[in-house]
Image: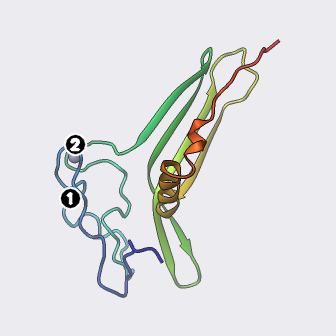
Amino acid sequence: MSDQFSHWSEAAEGQTPPRCSACRKPVRKAQAAFEGLFPGREAQPPWNAKWDGICEACGYRYEVTSRQIIIGKSERKMAARPASRSYKDADYAVILAGIELEIDDAPSSATNSIPGTVTKIFISRQELQALSSGLNNESSILLQQYDWDEDGH
Ligand SMILES: [Zn+2]
């Protein structure tokens, strides 16, 4: 189990929201993270439970976005936002924290024959850490790849 985990049967973990990089106040109001979110359940949700990724003090939106013009009016847009996913069995549930990665691959040109697609995928915090450290270390060759073009006729 991950080191950043709040068990319902042990001392609560992760109850203190981090400070906002924009306003320096906690990104969630006191107690808001864990009061009344799971009525009737034995749970100790951490500060990020059911957080929408927006600082409750100043409204700063925590997301990573990218917009890339491909050709003509065709573009790809990427957004990564805080997210969680619940895994349940008969009497137990675990909620993984992470991000939702949304790729909007939307050719907007009438001449483009490729239909647009929006893909959403959940990436757990552990997977996000592996991806981040992998891209910054031995796998950095992945970022040395080139795009290329070809004659469309
Ligand atoms: Zn803020």
Q: Nearer the viewer, residue 77 or 140?
A: 140
Which residue is rendered at x = 49% and y = 74% of the image? 94
Write down the residue under mark 2.
22
Q: Is residue 33 above or below residue 152?
A: below
Secondary structure at badge 2 equals loop
The residue lying furthest to the right in this view is 153
Q: Mark 2 or 1, which is nearer the eye?
A: 2
Between 45 and 19, the one lying in front of the other is: 19
- The colour scheme is rainbow
Q: Are marks 2 and 1 in contact (CB under 8 Å)?
A: no
The kind of residue on which mark 2 rests is Ala
Number of numbered callouts drawn: 2
Q: Which class describes the residues within 10 Å of circle 1: few (<14), some (14-19), or many (20+)?
A: some
Q: Where residue 75 is drawn, which disc sits there?
A: none
Q: Position of residue 125 (x, y in %)?
A: 46, 61
Residue 43, located in which quarter of the rendered image? bottom left
Using residue 153 as the reference point, say whether residue 147 is left or right of it. Answer: left
Ligand 1 contact, mark 1 (Cβ < 8 Å): no
Q: Residue at x 48, y 55 (%)?
A: 133
Residue that lies at the very extreme toward the bottom in this rendered image: 9
Q: Is residue 52 left or right of residue 96?
A: left
Q: 48 left or right of 30?
A: right
Pick the quarter of the image with the C terminus: top right
Query: Mark 1 — residue?
Result: 29
